[in-house]
Image (cartoon, rainbow, N blue to C red):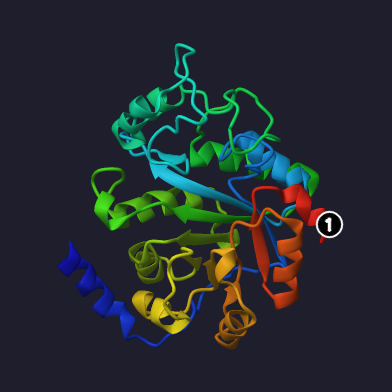
């Protein structure tokens, strides 16, 4: 796998570092992104969370993808059911040991949909409204958000994460190229590619996107522990993405300037404090991802 990935990188790394030439993405002047919809207020990555974020005035709906056993694209952050938020089909609370065994990639979507992920109080989000909810198919979620925003006359954007990892290919999810193709199949079918950014911590996913879907904007996600320089991080994917999305604790004025010099938008995650939001705005970031999209009204 390592040799295969190295070969893939060699094909693209030393090409000219340009953004996707055919990208049709039109970014807002400042991106207000609801993390997992509105995670702090509604059950994460569910249709109600997305609709709540729309009502709160976000420009962009942020979400994560996984894949089921029957190759359906499911909106979910975790590859398995999370014990913090899951109730079993027979109404029991899911234990942490059992949760680890319930990989979505080993379950059909019909099986996945039977688990509730909205009724159990989340220990980290006391403001989160408790309602019956399930992990939706990406296709069903997009049908719901597109109808809802069309009825309101809103042109919503999407920031969609490919949750792949080299260690988990064929275990927690399909091989990365298949994962990307499955996601893009839904996105293209629903006609939202021109309003979508595909983000990932996995450089391989972005390399595939740049090679096969160069017209779609991409975003490089960066963990808080990744202290490499911007140039070194970009070298790993071999092109200039439309967006650079670091943990907000990494953001400095120098980093913002470096991104803007390369014509990259910088959109940090996940910012849940209004004071920090205002600090980041002052530094010149192009958007913010937050669990609490109601905070954007205070900017």
Quick check: can you spot residue 48? yes
Q: Position of residue 214 (x, y in %)?
A: 44, 71
Q: Is residue 3 above or below residue 232?
A: above
Q: Is residue 224 above or below residue 45?
A: below
218 or 139, which lies in front? 218
The reply, left or right, for residue 36 in relation to residue 214 is: right
The reply, left or right, for residue 157 in relation to residue 162 is: right
Q: Is residue 216 above or below residue 87?
A: below
Q: Position of residue 158 (x, y in %)?
A: 59, 55
The reply, left or right, for residue 173 in relation to residue 27 is: left
| Residue in view at x 60 percent, y 27 percent | 121
Q: Farthest residue toward the right? A: 298
Q: How many marks?
A: 1
Quick check: can you spot residue 57? no
Mark 1 nearby-residue class (10 Å; few <14, some 14–19, many ≥20) = few
Quadrant in which the N terminus is drawn: bottom left
Q: Secondary structure at mark 1?
A: helix
The reply, left or right, for residue 183 in relation to residue 166 is: right
Q: Position of residue 22 (x, y in %)?
A: 51, 75
Q: Position of residue 295 (x, y in %)?
A: 77, 52
| Residue in view at x 30 percent, y 30 percent | 101
Quadrant in which the C terminus is drawn: bottom right
Residue on which disc 1 sits: 298
Q: Is residue 122 above or below residue 260?
A: above
| Residue in view at x 58 percent, y 66 percent | 249
185 or 110, which lies in front? 110
| Residue in view at x 45 percent, y 29 percent | 83
């Amino acid at each position: 796998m390592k040799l295969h990935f190295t070969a893939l990188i060699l094909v693209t790394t030393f090409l000219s570092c340009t953004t996707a030439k055919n990208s049709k993405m039109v970014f807002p002047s400042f991106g207000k992104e609801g993390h997992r919809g509105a995670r702090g207020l509604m059950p994460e990555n569910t249709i109600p969370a997305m609709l709540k974020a729309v009502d709160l005035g976000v420009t962009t709906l942020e979400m994560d993808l996984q894949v089921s056993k029957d190759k359906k694209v499911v909106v979910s952050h975790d590859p398995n059911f999370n014990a913090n938020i899951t109730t079993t089909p027979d109404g029991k609370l899911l234990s942490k040991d059992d949760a680890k065994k319930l990989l979505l990639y080993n379950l059909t979507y019909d099986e996945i949909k039977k688990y509730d992920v909205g009724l159990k109080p989340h220990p980290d989000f006391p403001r989160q409204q408790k309602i019956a909810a399930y992990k939706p198919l990406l296709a069903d979620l997009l049908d719901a958000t597109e109808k809802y925003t069309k009825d309101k006359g809103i042109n919503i954007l999407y920031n969609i994460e490919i949750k792949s990892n080299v260690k988990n290919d064929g275990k927690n999810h399909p091989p990365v190229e298949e994962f990307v193709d499955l996601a893009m199949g839904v996105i293209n079918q629903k006609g939202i590619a021109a309003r979508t950014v595909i983000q990932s911590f996995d450089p391989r996913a972005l390399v595939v996107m740049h090679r096969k879907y160069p017209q779609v904007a991409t975003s490089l996600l960066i963990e808080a522990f990744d202290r490499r320089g911007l140039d070194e991080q970009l070298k790993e994917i071999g092109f200039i993405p439309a967006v650079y999305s670091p943990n907000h604790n990494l953001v400095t004025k120098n980093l913002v300037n470096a991104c803007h010099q390369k014509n990259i938008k910088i959109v940090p995650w996940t910012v849940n404090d209004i004071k920090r939001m205002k600090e980041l705005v002052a530094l010149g970031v192009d958007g913010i991802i937050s669990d609490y999209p109601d905070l954007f009204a205070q900017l």
